[in-house]
Amino acid sequence: MPLLGQWAARQPDRPAAIFVDSGETLTFAQLDERATQAARWLVSRGLQPGDGVALLLENQPDFLVLSYGAKRAGLMVTPLSIHLQPHEVAHVLADSGARLLIYAPALATLAAARPGGGARLTTEEGRGAAGTVPPAPLPQRPIGREFLYSSGTTGLPKGIRRALTPFEDRHTPEFDMSWKDFYGFDERTVYLSPAPLYHAAPNRYVQRAIDHGGTAIITRRFDAEQCLALIAKHRVTHSQWVPTMFVRLLALSGATRRAHDLSSHRCAIHAAAPCPVAVKRAMIDWWGPILREYYAGSEGIGVCCIDSADWLRKPGSVGRPAYGAVHILGDDGGALPPGEVGRIWFAGGARFAYHNAPEKPAEAYNDHGWATLHDLGHVDAKGYLYLSDRRADLILSGGVNVYPAEIEAALAGHPLVADIGVIGVADAEFGERPLAVVVPREGLTATALLEFARARLAGPRLPRAVEFVDELPRSEAGKLLRRVLKERFRVIPPG
């Protein structure tokens, strides 16, 4: 019996998921029954193990029902961001080969981007069709899984496809890292997810919370004050965030922060982007030592984790490996000593392949079989990993490597900086120089910020200019889309 089915038998009336915006609740029994019904329907349509189903949905009950149901039917599930452009939707659907697209009626225009091949159904049509399929035992197929696409921060999204799980291994954990031990997930967990389910981390963590017998509190979008109110109302024990959410939470007034009882909250998970030291320290000062950070990627090649106690001793670190072993290599492939920045490689993690892009994994693996996400960083003498940046984002200024994330971390400490992104732009003398693109709070001037920078940065790391914007381009996961900034600011603005 699937994990969800086991919990449905033990606690049928407990909420598995509460969808805050619509007020809908799925109990364990309801989610289990509807997932089985969806699986029967998908099998009845002739879909075979390994076939693909794409979901174009907001955070709504159908998302979980269809995700669980498709995997019970042995299918690959590809969630699509509702913020993709039509050509990106068309690319993912064509590249994945999904045989069925299920979409919310409100997203019909975006769903129409699908090229030929494969069926399209609204959620209402799917529910209606599933209701006509008579009850019958499901075949013992391999267990399906998410067929996720990268966020496309450096181009069109890339599919990350892995083998199905054999039916007899359906209860075997995918990774060695124990969610129960490190995060404390169990049947008493109340997990707040203020992010889109079509993104990898919220998708996985919500389902892991449910698989451990806990309740997921799901919002359609992030609202800082609402999240505090939900923690108090539902006695939330666990939550997940990205650094930009922390920044917005810290921007709330002291009175607003004090108005909500957060005493039930014992684990705040965060990842997706580097968290400025000043921001994380402020969150620990406010919430206590409950923050747990991880560094990983959708590729699943390795995971590093760090709790608040270790982070306070090693500020800025993303921890030590919980899955896979970390190696730092130079451009020549040689191992680098502690403290020296190089490319981060994981050994001993899961193998992966980018779907329909055989050349991409070749770039991600070396002769030892180690894999990389193309991020740069260093380890200290104790093996704690510190991120510097992505290789593609490195600024080469006058022959010196400059890491945008280091500049961002320094300038994010200014109290009037709401958000910041640093990119390299063309410079006649140095080839490239860093440009700081900033979302300011009231009263911030470029002169004041550059003075702040001069006290903390020197030489090629000092931004040549500051540009103020209303908002930075970020993915739903909070990752800065530097390629968008680079397209907008190809050269340092005059003045």
Image (spheres, rainbow, N blue to C red):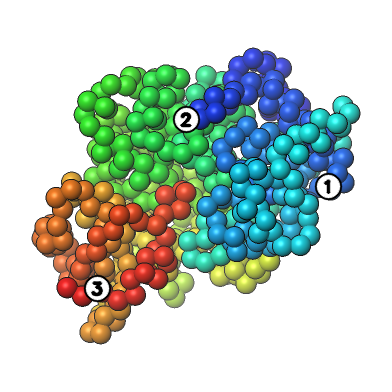
**Which residue corresponds to the image point at 69% horizontal and 22% vertical from the top-left?**
30
**Which residue corresponds to the image point at 27% horizontal and 37% vertical from the top-left?**
250
Instruction: Choose the circle earlier in sequence order: 3 or 2.
Output: 2
**Which residue corresponds to the image point at 62% horizontal and 72% vertical from the top-left?**
359
Comparing 111 with 234, the one in front is 111
Looking at the rendered structure, the kind of residue marked 3 is Pro
The answer to whether 453 appears left or right of 64 in the picture is left
Instruction: Choose the circle earlier in sequence order: 1 or 2.
Output: 1
Are the residues tagged 1 and 3 within 8 Å (C-beta)?
no
Query: Mark 1 sits on what residue?
Result: 47
Query: Mark 2 sits on what residue?
Result: 192
Q: Write down the quadrant of residue 490 in the picture.
A: bottom left
The answer to whether 329 appears left or right of 27 in the picture is left
Badge 2 element: strand
Give the alpha-carbon distance from disc 3 to disc 2, as whole Å: 42 Å
Looking at the rendered structure, the kind of residue marked 2 is Leu
Give the alpha-carbon distance from disc 1 to disc 2, as whole Å: 34 Å
Rendered position, 151 above or below 17: below
Query: Mark 3 sits on what residue?
Result: 493
Instruction: Choose the circle earlier in sequence order: 1 or 3.
Output: 1
Looking at the rendered structure, the kind of residue marked 1 is Leu
